[in-house]
Amino acid sequence: MSSKIKVRQAVEEEINWINKQYAEIAFKPSEFNNEYIVIAEIEGKKCGLGRLVKINKHHTELGGIYVFNSYRGLGIAEAIVSFLCINNPYSNAVIWCLPFENLKNFYGKFGFMQSSIKPPQEVLAKHEWCNTGGIYLKKVLLLSKQS
């Protein structure tokens, strides 16, 4: 299999497919009009997705990074996160990231770190939900970077 990864912006007609993927892994659903959603493909086959969620003009959340099991280990998550950071349409905002604890170093490669900046209430609430909702077995961190 070729490992040529293409990352592209999703189109609105794909929102049901996107939310079906997120539902399967207990991620919050996407709202197309408030997010910049991308899909990764190899040889025309969808293999992963991710998103930037606009919170307000000063804050954005990077999330929903998901690579399908049969495509793991090919650099797809890195391609998705890199694409989202480079093509972020919400410039001049703090980007928040709530990764599982074991992914701290992965997100650190993109400049995400623990921050002294106070997160907006939406991010704090989601962080608490991730860590206390009983859905995820791994601890979820709260990281940020300036876009």
Image: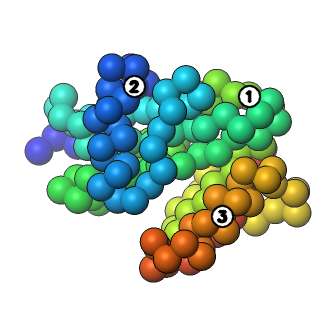
Q: Position of residue 38 (x, y in %)?
A: 43, 32
Residue 9: give its label.
Answer: none
Name the secondary structure under disc 1.
loop
Label 3 vs label 1, nearer the camera: 3
* Residue depicted at x 51% and y 45%: 81
Q: Position of residue 101 (x, y in %)?
A: 56, 74
Q: Position of residue 93 (x, y in %)?
A: 78, 36
Give the mark nearer the N terminus: 1 vs 2: 2
Give the mark nearer the N terminus: 3 vs 1: 1
**Residue on which disc 1 sits:** 91
* Residue depicted at x 49% and y 77%: 134
Report how many numbered discs are placed on residues in the image. 3
Quarter holding residue 49:
top left
In the depicted structure, whether residue 56 falls above or below residue 13: below
Contact (CB < 8 A) between labels 3 and 1?
no
Residue 10: give its label.
Answer: 2
* Residue depicted at x 37% and y 29%: 15
* Amino acid under disc 2: Ala
Contact (CB < 8 A) between labels 3 and 2?
no
Give the mark nearer the N terminus: 3 vs 2: 2
Left or right: residue 41 versus residue 132 is left
Within 10 angstroms of label 2, few (less than 14), some, or many (20 or more) residues? some
Residue 127: give its label.
Answer: 3
Left or right: residue 146 versus residue 35 is right
